[in-house]
Image (tube, coloured by chain):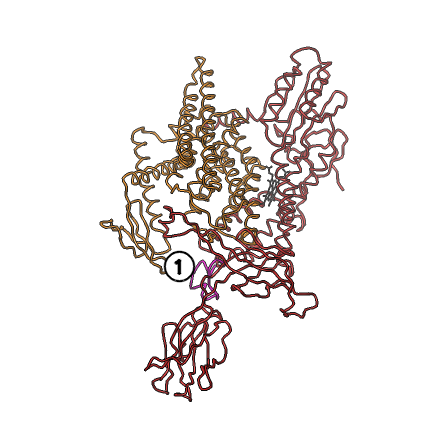
Chain colours: A orange, B red
Amino acid sequence: MSLIDLSGNLLEAAFIAYLIATLLIGGSIKSSKPDGAEKRANKWGYLAIIVTIIGFLAHLGYFITRWIYSGHAPVSNMFEFSTAFGMFLVGAFILMYFMYRVTALGLVALPIALLIIGWAAMFPREVTPLVPSLQSHWLTIHVITAALGQSILAISAVAGLLYLLKAVDPKKKGKERFWLEAVLYFLVVIVGFIAVTSGFKAAGYEAEYSYINKDDQELTIIYNLPPFFGMNESQAITEGAMVPLIEMPAFIHAAKLTTVVWSLLVGTVLYLLIRLITRKRIIEMLNPLATKVNLQLFDEIGYRSVLIGFPVFSLGALVFAMIWAEQAWGRFWGWDPKEVWALITWLFYAAFLHLRLSRGWEGRKSAWLALIGFGIIIFNLVVVNLVIAGLHSYA
Amino acid sequence: MEKIVCTCGHENAVGTKICGNCGRPLTEEAKSQKVLDMKYDGSAIRSKTYNKSIVDKIWNFFSSVKVGVSLIIITLVVSSFGTIFPQEFYVTAGTDAERALYYQTNYGSIGTLYYNLGLADLYSTWWFQALVGMLGISIIVASIDRGLPLHKSLKNQRVKRHESFMRRQRIIAEGAITKEDTSKTLDKVEEKLKKLNYKVRRDGTALLAEKGRFARYGPYINHLGLITFLVGVMLHQLPGMYVDDSMWIREGETRAIPGMNGYFLENKQFIFETHDNDPTTAQIQQGVNAVAKNYQTDVVLYKQSEDALPGQTDQLEIVKEYSIRVNHPLEHDGFALYQMDFRLNELKAMTFSLTNKETGASLGDVTIDLRNPKKEYVIDEQTKVILVNYFPDFTGFNDKGEPQTATPNPNNPAFIFNMITPDTPEGEISFVAIQQTVEGSGTGENLYKMSFKGVDTINMSGLTIRMDKTIPLLVVGAFIFLLGLTIGSYWNHRRVWVELLSDGNIRLAAHTNKNWFGIKKEINVLTEYAHLPQYIDQLDDEDDEKIKKETIE
Ligand code: HEM
């Protein structure tokens, strides 16, 4: 088995371990009935942590073997970066477990890590060579530290979500119930993205089109999903390829828009199916799992993870980024979208910390802020990378 | 100045909420609190005390955390607008009109609006900079406003605190000890807390244990670092602090380095390499064939000798030889040269044959150096080609029919030749551009033409020259910021007050600025060791009550 195959297998092993650990934690919470079940619950929780750590080690093994194989830190494209982010998220969960001894965090942290890994797997997985600007140790240090900081910050959203699952009454109509359900709907949409992408991939769907970009050049593009939207003046190259339903102007990337719409569509269908079958909102199904959540403790964990993550993030996403930028371009700051969004993330968490200084911002409000912060991190990962084209590229 | 005199006799500054000496709550608000608001230890905060003069009002505005947070949020939201479309410094367009056109053609009327609102150059607009400036002022004012009183009250702490202070702490225990008698209790408490790295002071029957007080200075240190950094950024505007220049240099050329007086650079060669990998999926999807691996300019840096005249290039001393690559700038004397851009196969010279159109016979070749064209090219005594006019970057004819050039760079050279031969001693005018020849009017059909024979090309390297004297200040600022952040985030200020009461009971109160989970763990250990009465967390009940209320509603 070659190193890169081994690397792939380790990643799969990690994925399966996280899945099992999630189920174990679910079990540990479900079984808390008075008949001495407290003990059993602890045993399950303990087992869950062990499985999580095994998964994490496998994940780390993936990371290291891929690093050795490719000769550079595996954080240089969407697949690699997302996978690493998932790994750090699990790492941050383990760290928090050893600080607070609450397995319930894993109930949200692990599924989110699973979603992130699943998302990552939808992107090309080959090892890509590095363009000159990326060939820097500072870049490696910057990306890894920033991702580490983001993952610790993300734990606050994990704690926040659990807090809200308990604190928000799923039977009572209101804004909070609506938005909390919306957050979960969004997670289902990601499942939709994974389902539709891997579905068409398994079926071998591929259609090539030519189009004219905004600089009037003729280029070609491969669609892996049937095109709702066509690129500017697109012409099918693959024979018998479907004609796009709507053609978009040059400044909109119609292929990506198609992916978004497909994901929303499939995600919505999935969501409706869940609602039809269970006759419940998702938050209502999850509410029992959160009953054991100690609100004050989870509020504290949420605050604490921001406090721990903020300096790491500042170091990685701003200071190291500036050192690298100074070395590569002769300027420590260039107002590139990626940089601006790192700054926005930083400012947001600074605002979070200051709001915590005033009374009345603990608890629910804080939990909501943590979710918004995670939203910004995800926006940074997804939209800024895929939609707002970065101008960093030298190639 | 007016003072508030506490029952204990201590004089406190006006605005003090908790007596600095005994800890009695002084204001009605503090008295009504079940758990005291321990922010800044209840010391007098200027902004919370005075609000009369205009200076007070401005001071209070900037020191308000609400205002500070609002400024942060506004900056954050406004910054995001700048990422909707590319900023104009990333757009290759020379003039305002071209930039306006760029936004219009690429993004339609929304693009035009974006450009007209100034969002295309958002980060250098006066109002964005004013916003950041206000944020800076706010940080300074808020830090002074709270930092100084906090420092004073932390420095002068008395061990013994009044019961009304202790009972209003979040963690409080009161009652009889659970084992043994009280004669040893304070000793045991002291012993255990010292083991836990507390500094312990005793005053009669009272004890104060404290650790991590320096953590309280964390926010002030990190704010100081931020301000230092911002000052560094502002200093960029001062002349002489910052050089940002660029140069194009061809292989084989030696040129003065702009912005770096007395220095010259020779470009020995430019190297461009690609990875010889098989194209990956991502590459295929994006239609890219090869991934760049290296951009490199091999250079020699020269310095003019001391006694040379300005501009004199024959007395150059070699300073160093270096290969400038991306991420590996050439550094010297505070300056750095960065590999930023390149052009491969740049036109260097063009060769034409002076050809008889009918017979095809050539009278000789003319090679024109496109950077340094000569006035005339003599082939022999009776034959020469005069270069009447030269358009290095020909863009077409204006409405008067005159040829135009966009730049002085030979991207698309065009020439007007006057061809003098034995057959045409008067000369024949010919306009020659790439793929087009327009013959001079009035002279009828030309006998001769300049037929294109070939080009010489050369690689060009684009370098950026930077000098930034503010960097040390920025480094110091960033360092102070991170230091303060670390201190404030990874350490907490914990205090435990214990008093042996006259009735034989024990009273314990504890406070931490952060991480209550951590201090409770320590108090648990202490409680067990010294057989203290079990403490309660007064906010725990409060929270439960709150939730109960919420579920009942
Ligand atoms: C982006 C800019 C800023 C950053 C990165 C920043 C950073 C911080 C951090 C990390 C803390 C510690 C928070 C905690 O430990 O919970 C803090 C505390 C504080 N900040 Fe800022 N800050 C910024 C701007 C401001 C502004 C504009 C104000 C103005 C009102 C302000 C006022 C304060 C105050 C009053 C404290 C509490 C000090 C204490 O606990 O003794 N900060 N700041």
Residue A129 is at least partly visible in this image: yes
Res. A174 image quadrant: top left
Res. A123 image quadrant: top left
Dominant SS type (magenta): helix
Looking at the rendered structure, the number of numbered marks drawn on it comes to 1
In the rendered image, the residue lying farthest to the bottom is B426
Residue denoted by label 1: B106
In the rendered image, the residue lying farthest to the left is A240
Q: Give the quadrant of the N terminus of chain A.
A: top left
In the rendered image, the residue lying farthest to the top is B180
Q: Is A185 rendered above or below residue B296?
A: above
**Residue B109 in magenta stretch:** yes
The amino acid marked with disc number 1 is Asn
**Residue B403 in magenta stretch:** no
Left or right: residue B29 compared with residue B85: right
Q: Which residues are magenta?
A: B89-117
Q: Quadrant of ligand 1?
A: top right
Mark 1 near ligand 1 (CB under 8 Å)? Answer: no
